[in-house]
Image: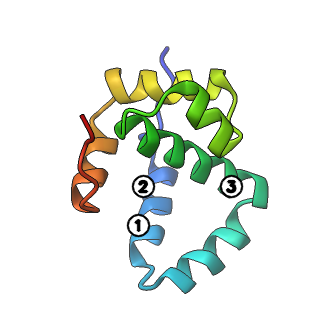
């Protein structure tokens, strides 16, 4: 059986996140819900994805973010074979893809 994030408790968690109205509320909520390392790790993966989107090399990304090449590879794989959510977010944030 394949593991899924689509559960009732995850729905409730996402509803809670969507109820937040400011960056300060996000900080307060995630400081309560997650460890510092968990939030920093997620933010690092997003930074890796942004840099991959900008066509940076693994070496450049590792140097700037401190991410391992394994993490960079996992993020790259999810950008290629995932649900397209990174591209959706980058578009909404106005982050153009660099050729």
Q: Is residue 81 left or right of residue 35?
A: left
Q: Earlier in the sequence, mark 2 or mark 3?
A: 2
Which quarter of the picture shows residue 30? bottom right
The residues tagged by marks 2 and 1 sit, at their Cα atoms, a distance apart of 6 Å
Which quarter of the picture shows residue 34? bottom right
Q: Secondary structure at mark 1?
A: helix
Residue at x-position 49% and y-position 27% = 57
Residue at x-position 46% and y-position 69% = 17
Q: Are marks 2 and 3 in contact (CB under 8 Å)?
A: no
Circle 2 is placed at which residue position?
Answer: 11
Q: Quadrant of the C terminus?
A: top left
Circle 3 is placed at which residue position?
Answer: 40
Q: Is residue 53 above or below residue 75?
A: below
Q: Secondary structure at mark 3?
A: helix
x then y, percent, for residue 52: 42, 34
Q: Is residue 75 above or below residue 33?
A: above
Q: Are marks 2 and 1 in contact (CB under 8 Å)?
A: yes
x then y, percent, for residue 9: 52, 53
The residues tagged by marks 1 and 3 sit, at their Cα atoms, a distance apart of 22 Å
Circle 1 is placed at which residue position?
Answer: 15
Q: Earlier in the sequence, mark 1 or mark 3?
A: 1
x then y, percent, for residue 3: 51, 25
Q: Nearer the viewer, mark 2 or mark 3?
A: 3
x then y, percent, for residue 4: 46, 31
The residues tagged by marks 2 and 3 sit, at their Cα atoms, a distance apart of 23 Å
Q: Nearer the viewer, mark 1 or mark 3?
A: 3
Q: Nearer the viewer, residue 42 or 4?
A: 42
Callout 3 crowding tier (Cα within 10 Å): few <14, some 14–19, many ≥20:
few
Q: Secondary structure at mark 2?
A: helix
Residue at x-position 41% and y-position 85% = 21
């Amino acid at each position: 059986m394949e593991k899924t994030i689509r559960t009732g408790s995850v729905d409730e968690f996402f509803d809670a996140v969507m109820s937040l109205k400011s960056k300060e509320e996000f900080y307060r909520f995630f400081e309560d819900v997650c460890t510092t390392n968990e939030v920093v790790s997620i933010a690092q993966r997003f930074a890796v994805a942004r840099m991959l989107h900008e066509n940076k090399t693994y070496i450049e990304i590792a140097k700037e973010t401190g991410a391992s090449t394994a993490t960079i590879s996992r993020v790259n794989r999810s950008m290629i074979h995932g649900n397209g959510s990174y591209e959706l977010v980058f578009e909404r944030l106005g982050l153009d893809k660099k050729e």
